[in-house]
């Protein structure tokens, strides 16, 4: 029989290796992306790749400028946030402060259900129902536009924003609220002048993670945004965000070709952007934790 | 302070609160509308044959059985990879690790992995499992890719469940001479199991609906046969929906099938989520007692 101290050590080491798994995968992703995507940077140059205005990967000679795709991603994400942030934060306030507990216990799971709906279903809805509706409404040649994509992404980002903002509001110590109410503030004054300023960094986390979710979303924009790889001039025109472009073209790009490397190059840009937002969210959430714990 | 001023303040409150209520109503309305329209358009094609038959006539007729089966294989496969990995990682983080830089870095890793866009996972799977390991476009490649996608969900849920187990349990076990691992195995894990299972169920719900990670790693639009081994490519429900509405050649026949498939997928995913939510509520009550 091995003595128990040794056994404990072995168990601990094995568990530690398991715990490293997410770091290992994350590192693996970085290595793979750079390995497969770097050749295109050295070929066309990073600046030309990011700010080039033409994306014609199959032309002869090909053009690998992802500015139209990058701008498309930014445009639909900003549009999604215009919808998701005000609705999400005010619903979160309503849910956490105004709804009675019993109704809250029903509404919160419903919002979580919204998060559970698969993205391809949102895509189908946007493509076949919302798209045609907006087409009629604005009398457009196609209903698959930046606006349609932004609305669908906004709906998809809502649950993230609502549930994280709600967590942030609930994390504000109850005595803050009691003190304000005792001083004669109305409930709204308490919320706007005491709760919200305290919860700001928590809200910021919610919004940043919502942005991350929207910018990385693939299926919905692939189905709904219309797919035109041109610099977006209006929100009522079709466009093609980075994620949609990767998903649409990966099947056709021969392995090892410039096109193939360019798609990994786009993934690098995408990965760096989401990594940036995730780190910002992490910093904001740590700040928030310090603030409400009163240290 | 005069009464008028007070009335004014209360009126402001009422206006603002009704606006907030309205926004929440909008959020819920979006959910209801999406579910309503998908069901309304798709429920008509659903019958036993739709669920149990192979597709026929170049995907314009017949059922979705291979897609249903394919999704089942992918879900089971990915959970088999991700559950042990995620649960053991969570045990280390909650039961063994000392708070400090190491844990902080691992946690940042988990958070960032959760934020990686799903299509990037697909590229990773394509490059590593399909090409480098030579698994090809297969159930194995798809399940392995999906396992990485849900790993953060499972780690977080398991951590939460383990943290919810009161410290008295651990102290009691350690005090009668059990080692840390015995304590974890015989006391903490059983108590946390319902919560961990909830996390795995949420993971299943997520995997069943993921499309982007399997486009290049596992999914095929059409296959005449059912998959014969883990190295076969498979049809899957979400990819089937996507393929029917985007690459179909006969939209008037295929779009209704896409709605039907969407109803099946949506019903499955909502049911899975509902089970997870109910389990979580029960688990929370149990722990509080």
Image (tube, rainbow, N blue to C red):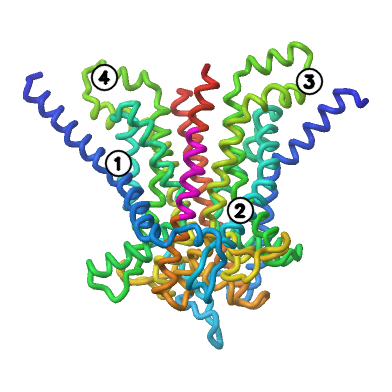
Q: Main secondary structure of the magenta part?
A: helix
Q: Earlier in the sequence, mark 2 or mark 3?
A: 2
Instruction: Give left or right: position of A189 versus B283.
Output: left
Residue at mark 1 shares a chain with residue at mark 3: yes
Question: Disc number at residue B24?
Answer: 1
Question: Disc number at residue B179?
Answer: 3
Looking at the rendered structure, the secondary structure element under dot 3 is: loop
Question: Disc number at residue B83?
Answer: none
Residue at the spot x=39%, y=57% of the render?
B43
Label 3 Cα neighbours within 10 Å, binned few <14 / some 14-19 / many ≥20 = some
Q: To which residue does mark 4 refer?
A: A181
Distance between the alpha carbons at the discs numbered 2 and 3: 39 Å
Instruction: Give left or right: position of A158 versus B226.
Output: left
Q: Earlier in the sequence, mark 1 or mark 3?
A: 1
* Relative image position of residue B142 (x, y in whole percent): 65, 59
Q: Nearer the viewer, residue B29 or A93?
A: B29
Start and end of the magenta stretch? Answer: B264-278
């Amino acid at each position: 029989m091995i003595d128990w101290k040794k056994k404990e050590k072995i168990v601990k080491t094995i568990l530690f290796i398991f715990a490293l798994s997410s770091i290992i995968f994350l590192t693996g992703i970085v290595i793979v992306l750079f390995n497969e995507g770097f050749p295109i940077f050295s070929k066309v140059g990073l600046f030309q790749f990011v700010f080039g205005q033409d994306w014609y990967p199959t032309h002869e000679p090909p053009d690998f400028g992802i500015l139209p795709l990058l701008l498309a991603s930014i445009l639909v994400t900003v549009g999604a946030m215009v919808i998701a942030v005000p609705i999400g934060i005010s619903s979160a306030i309503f849910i956490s402060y105004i709804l009675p507990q019993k109704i809250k216990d029903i509404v919160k799971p419903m919002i979580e259900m919204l998060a559970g709906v698969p993205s391809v279903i949102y895509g189908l809805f946007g493509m076949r129902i919302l798209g045609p509706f907006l087409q009629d409404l604005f009398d457009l040649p196609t209903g698959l536009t930046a606006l349609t994509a932004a609305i669908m992404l906004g709906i998809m980002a809502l649950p993230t924003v609502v549930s994280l903002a709600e967590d942030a509001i609930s994390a504000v110590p109850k005595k803050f609220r009691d003190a304000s109410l005792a001083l004669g503030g109305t409930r709204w004054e308490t919320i706007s002048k005491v709760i919200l300023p305290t919860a700001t960094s928590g809200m910021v986390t919610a919004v940043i993670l919502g942005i991350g979710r929207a910018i990385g979303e693939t299926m919905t924009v692939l189905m709904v945004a219309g797919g035109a790889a041109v610099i977006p001039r209006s929100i009522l025109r079709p466009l093609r965000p980075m994620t949609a472009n990767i998903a649409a073209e990966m099947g056709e790009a021969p392995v090892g070709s410039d096109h193939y490397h360019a798609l990994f190059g786009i993934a690098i840009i995408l990965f760096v952007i989401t990594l940036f937002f995730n780190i910002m969210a992490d910093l904001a959430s740590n700040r928030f934790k310090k603030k409400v714990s009163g240290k | 302070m005069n009464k008028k001023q007070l009335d004014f303040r209360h009126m402001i409150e009422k206006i603002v609160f009704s606006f907030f209520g309205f926004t929440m109503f909008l959020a819920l309305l979006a959910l209801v509308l999406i579910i309503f329209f998908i069901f309304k358009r798709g429920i008509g094609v659903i019958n036993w044959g739709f669920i149990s038959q192979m597709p026929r006539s170049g995907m314009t007729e017949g059922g979705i059985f291979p897609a249903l089966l394919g999704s089942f294989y992918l879900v089971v496969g990915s959970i088999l990879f991700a559950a042990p990995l995620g649960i053991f990682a969570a045990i280390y983080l909650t039961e063994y690790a000392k708070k400090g830089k190491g844990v902080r870095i691992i946690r940042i890793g988990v958070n960032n992995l959760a934020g990686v866009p799903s299509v990037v996972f697909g590229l990773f799977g394509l490059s590593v499992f399909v090409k480098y390991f030579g698994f090809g476009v297969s159930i194995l490649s798809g399940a392995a890719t999906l396992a990485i996608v849900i790993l953060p969900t499972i780690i977080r849920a398991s951590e939460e469940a383990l943290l919810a187990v009161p410290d008295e349990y651990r102290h009691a076990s350690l005090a009668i001479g059990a080692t840390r691992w015995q304590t974890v195995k015989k006391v903490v894990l059983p108590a946390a199991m319902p919560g961990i299972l909830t996390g795995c169920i949420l993971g299943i719900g997520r995997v069943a609906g993921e499309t982007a990670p399997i486009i290049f790693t596992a999914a095929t639009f059409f296959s005449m046969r059912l998959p014969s081994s883990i190295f076969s490519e498979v049809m899957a429900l979400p990819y089937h929906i996507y393929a029917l509405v985007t690459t179909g050649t006969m939209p008037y026949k295929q779009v209704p099938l896409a709605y039907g498939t969407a109803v099946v997928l949506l019903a499955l995913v909502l049911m899975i989520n509902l089970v997870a939510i109910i389990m979580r509520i029960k688990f929370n009550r149990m722990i509080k007692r």
